[in-house]
Amino acid sequence: MRSMRKAITAALAAGVLVSTAACSSDDSSSDGDAKSGGLAEALRASQEKSAEASTVAVTATMSMDMPEGMAFSYELSGVTGWDPLAMDVTMDMTEFFEAMAEMMGDDSGEVPEAVMNLRFIDNVMYMGGTPFEEELDGASWVKIDLEDVDPNDPAFAQTAEQLKSAENMAQSPASQVALLLESDDVEHVGSEDLDGRATEKYAGTLTAEELVAADASAAHMNEEDVEDLLATLEQMGADGFELTVWVDEDDLPARIDMRFAVEEGGEVSYSTVYEDYGIELNVEAPDEADVVDFADARGAGL
């Protein structure tokens, strides 16, 4: 079970690594200029146009299928924005918590539904929903100011990974396209109808080391964390990270996938569908009287 816990942690962290690398990729990278002119031009046009939109509606899924027979997924849907980063989304973590309970040997009964409401504004995450209803003594929201939290606090580690996965699944699609341009083997792989949207499909692969290289700052991960992650991914047999982008007729990313295989036939994948670019997004912090700080909630047993 310890190896399974390590695998799940690595899968969540890998998603953070991919998204963080994308966010710090240089939009004017010379690598893209060295590629075939038409391909690079098409991807850069998509990158620039999606960045200009500043908001988008997203439906994202993270799924993990491990060789030991354990599988789970979680979903996120709502509206996100960038410059500055903001989001108002709903995240269904029920299968994730069921998998964690099974992994920990908890046979106390059925895991209750775990649908979370997430709001992110001014670098503060507000979490509400069914996982907190019985723990907050009348309040409805937990508040986490990411600037005030020690990322090395073991008690916060699992929550931080979940939050970072949610936050990074909601990042600008332009940054993900920029990351694809870092791949040495990016190519146009054909046309595809995507739920009624005519798209052109592009794909490429990167190694974990290349992802780290694309993220020079690695703002939320120290050197030891990166080394541990790379070592764990190597042990899992995860090497090539496949990135796929579907671009619609308006030159906007319609869907972006990231997946990587692990030993003995397992796979981890992240898939995000983007719609309604430029949609209105007005994220408001909940009433302070209805909010509990994460440190206090944790002390109460959350």
Image (tube, helix red, strand yellow):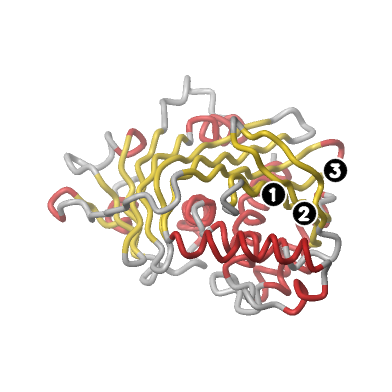
Is the C-beta separation of discs 2 and 1 under 8 Å? yes
In the image, 167: left or right of 121?
Answer: right
The label shown at residue 241 is 2
Amino acid type at circle 3 is Glu
Which residue shows up at 81% across the image and 62% down it? 207
Question: Which residue does the numbered mark 3 point to in the structure image?
Answer: 263
Neighbor class of circle 2 (other Cα within 10 Å; few <14, some 14-19, many 20+) is many
Relative to 227, does residue 105 appear above or below in the rendering? above
Relative to 221, does residue 64 appear above or below in the rendering? above
Neighbor class of circle 3 (other Cα within 10 Å; few <14, some 14-19, many 20+) is few
Which residue shows up at 28% across the image and 39% down it? 135
Amino acid type at circle 2 is Phe
In the image, 209: left or right of 194?
Answer: right
Front position in the image: 58 or 240: 58
Check disc 2 and report its element: helix, strand or loop.
Answer: strand
Q: How far apart are marks 2 and 3 (CA)?
A: 14 Å
Front position in the image: 3 or 254: 254
Q: How far apart are marks 2 and 1 (CA)?
A: 7 Å
Q: Work out whether mark 2 precedes mark 1 in sequence or the reverse, and give the earlier one.
A: 2
Question: Which residue does the numbered mark 1 point to in the structure image?
Answer: 258
- Which corner quadrant holds the N terminus? top right
| Residue sticking out furthest to the left | 289
Estimate the x, y position of residue 129 in percent, counting from the top left: 32, 37
Which residue shows up at 79% across the image and 64% down it? 183
Check disc 1 and report its element: helix, strand or loop.
Answer: strand
| Residue sticking out furthest to the top | 109
Amino acid type at circle 1 is Met
Q: Distance between the residues labelled 1 and 3?
A: 17 Å
The label shown at residue 71 is none
Q: Work out whether mark 1 precedes mark 3 in sequence or the reverse, and give the earlier one.
A: 1
